[in-house]
Image (tube, rainbow, N blue to C red):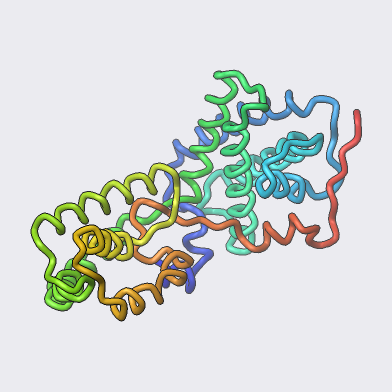
């Protein structure tokens, strides 16, 4: 998946296989969400690029007079783009990146807004914004079915071929004594709960390092001791693993695109100014 994203990013930036019925529902949800946001933005207008104000909110989690007006404009721009082409598959390649960035930025802003206790959103307003966020996520946060199947087959074949090395490393080279059945069961249970919790809170984790840490923990708790050379070698890939999302299960990584962050820092010298209507 990482190779696909790196080599053909425009092909997988948006879910071009999204059914027309979902595109229609997207437009309905967009109109409803825009109405809610516009009501909160009453009395203010945005001059210039709305993205810096929305990016600032995502980064700082602080609502100011420019947050809602800028978000309202951005929602309208996304709706306009989707309406123009009537299908995500028809959006030109040169426009895909910008559309995807805008969708992701709005989705993240809505995620924080719905959690903000000082935001004073009613249950109906939260429900409306959440429905729109789900539509945005369906268009940007997806993995093609054939990619899931290919990855599963590759993992299965790799384990079939290299199982002995895996078993020896996990069972014999992490601790100074061989792994017992009880330690193995404890490590697996801890790994399962850790990955489930990470999935719930949207945290990037590596199954490899979670399980290895679980085994190391059982060895330490049992007083068996650890082979520091194995622990040290295994830790070298942690930073790269988390950064790339390698081995991450159930925790899709969707970092805010650099172009969006640049906009938040005043990209293209455009600034968003809000004035009373």
Name the spot of residue 270 as percent of width and height, x first. Answer: 84, 55
**Left or right of 34, for residue 223:** left
Position of the N terminus, as image quadrant, is: bottom left
Rendered residue at 70%/49% (across/down): 55
Rendered residue at 39%/58% (across/down): 205
Rendered residue at 55%/19% (across/down): 123
Name the spot of residue 5 as percent of width and height, x first. Answer: 47, 67
- Residue 82, picture quadrant: top right
**Left or right of 137, for residue 77:** right
Rendered residue at 46%/50% (across/down): 141
Name the spot of residue 24 as percent of width and height, x first. Answer: 51, 35
**Left or right of 38, for residue 145:** left
> Does any portion of residue 270 appear in the rendered image?
yes
Residue furthest out toward the left: 181
Residue furthest out toward the front: 223
- Residue 118, picture quadrant: top right
> Does any portion of residue 211 appear in the rendered image?
no
Position of the C terminus, as image quadrant, is: top right
Q: Nearer the viewer, residue 261 or 141?
A: 261
Tag count: 0
Name the spot of residue 215 as percent of width and height, x first. Answer: 23, 62
- Residue 2, picture quadrant: bottom left
Residue furthest out toward the right: 276
**Left or right of 175, for residue 61:** right
């Amino acid at each position: 998946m990482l190779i696909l994203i790196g080599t053909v990013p425009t092909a997988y930036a948006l879910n071009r296989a999204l059914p027309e019925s979902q595109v229609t529902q997207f437009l309905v949800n967009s109109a409803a969400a825009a109405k809610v946001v516009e009501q909160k933005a009453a009395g203010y207008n945005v001059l210039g690029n709305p993205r810096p104000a929305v990016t600032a909110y995502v980064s700082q989690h602080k609502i100011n007079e420019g947050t809602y007006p800028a978000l309202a404009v951005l929602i309208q721009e996304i709706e306009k783009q989707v309406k123009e082409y009537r299908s995500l598959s028809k959006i030109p390649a040169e426009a895909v990146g910008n559309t995807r960035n805008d969708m992701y930025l709005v989705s993240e802003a809505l995620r924080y807004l719905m959690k903000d206790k000082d935001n004073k959103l009613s249950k109906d307003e939260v429900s409306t914004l959440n429905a729109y966020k789900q539509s945005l996520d369906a268009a940007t946060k997806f993995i093609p079915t054939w990619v899931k199947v290919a990855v599963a087959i590759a993992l299965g074949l790799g384990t079939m071929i290299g199982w002995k090395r895996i078993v020896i490393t996990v069972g014999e080279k992490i601790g100074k004594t061989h792994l017992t059945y009880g330690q193995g069961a404890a490590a697996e249970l801890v790994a399962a709960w850790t990955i489930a919790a990470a999935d719930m809170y949207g945290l990037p984790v590596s199954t490899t390092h979670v399980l290895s840490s679980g085994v190391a923990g059982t060895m330490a708790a049992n007083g068996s001791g650890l082979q520091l050379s194995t622990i040290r070698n295994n830790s070298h890939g942690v930073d790269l693993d988390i950064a790339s999302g390698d081995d991450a299960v159930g925790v899709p990584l969707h970092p805010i695109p650099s172009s969006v962050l640049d906009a938040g820092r005043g990209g293209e010298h455009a600034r968003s100014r809000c004035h009373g209507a």
